[in-house]
Amino acid sequence: MTELFTAAVIRDKGGPFRIEQVRRRAIADDEVLVRVVATGMCHTDMVARDQIFPVPHPIVLGHEGSGIVDEVGKNVHELEKGDHVVLSFLNCNVCDPCHEGHPAYCANFNAWNFSGQRIDGSHVLEADDGTLLNDRFFGQSSFAQYAIANARNAIKVRKDAPLELLGPLGCGIQTGAGTVMNALKVAPGSSFAAWGGGAVGLSGVMAAAAIGATTIVAIDIVPSRLELAMELGATHTINSKEENAAERVKEITGGGAHSAMDSTGIAALVSAMVSSLRPSGTAAVVGASKPGTMAEIDLVDVMQSCKRLIGVVEGDSVPTTLIPVLVDLHMSGRFPFDRLVKFYDLDRINEAAEDSEKGITLKPIVRMPQ
């Protein structure tokens, strides 16, 4: 076993994160050891902490890590020590969706990302007392000073980019931007509506603006988020507490949006989003709802107007392709996702979680001790 290092461990349903000393086991031949610089905090971390999705505890969470490769397995040839990487989700690389170029829709996604162990049942982390910890969350468990990832989910990025900022590109930012760019294929000159003005929704706004959509509508109930949306590329905003959002989208877009994305997971908003589409429009659901959540959809409207409602995971992205593109867009000033973030040191991780859940911070990023 290696020397001790610091990690945030969830031992009880609902938290808190406990700062502990842990050890790691040796990396496998297809893995890399990454010295984590910083890790974004995502709603999915909270879902796992609260066991809304039944991941095993105790566990080290964190799935938006960025850092520097410290060691590579003997079968890893595309990465080397010293490379800067963003850690993303892990896929099996053998199922039909993976072979068809949709790794985010991997048929074995849960086993590779939520089981708390390697696919062979082995673990990476131990507590200081020698007991095993569940790990491999999204193939990384990056709320720690070190993370072991597969070479497939460690995405090499340019070294002149601000590494501590880049972690959220691995999940939340990728989800919003990728949904716009890959799943919805928002076109220049088209209209797009973002239902929800959190980090995912605003990433969609920025991506639509970068692509050249000319009518971009942001819907939320928090005035500060709507103000920020305008600064990030939205052409119109709607406070859904004060207006009928679906009707306003139709008015703004002249009959309905070409495409739309819901990042809230709220059933009533999904229903409104579908109704606000123009004929042949497409709406994407990316927000996490509680299992069993049902939305009412007017099937006659969907059929007669040839509308589409799709579910999207991780922006239907190929991370090795999309993440470097988003980095380049950011470095050129066309994707300013740094406007969404606030940094917290690891010993303030519970504060970061609380601020995220209260909506105080759109995208917390937790810095690791160096």
Image (tube, rainbow, N blue to C red):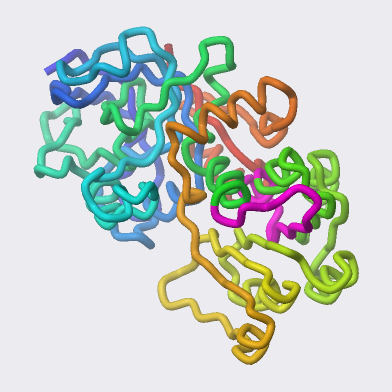
Q: Is residue 135 left or right of residue 214?
A: left
- Where residue 370 sits, quadrant-wise, is top left
Q: Residue furthest bottom?
A: 300
The answer to whether residue 39 is visible is yes
Q: Residue furthest top?
A: 82
Q: Picture coordinates of residue 65 (x, y %)?
A: 43, 29
| Residues rendered magenta in the picture | 183-203
Q: Nearer the viewer, residue 303 or 221?
A: 303
Say above or below: 136 vs 81. below
Say above or below: 328 vs 113. above
Q: Nearer the viewer, residue 113 or 297?
A: 297
Q: Picture coordinates of residue 298 (x, y %)?
A: 63, 88
Q: Is residue 52 left or right of residue 294?
A: left
Residue 10: in magenta span: no
Q: Is residue 77 left or right of residue 221?
A: left
What residue do we see at 49% from left, 39% from top? Answer: 350
Q: Picture coordinates of residue 171 (x, y %)?
A: 48, 42
The answer to whether residue 358 is visible is no
Q: Is residue 216 left or right of residue 56?
A: right
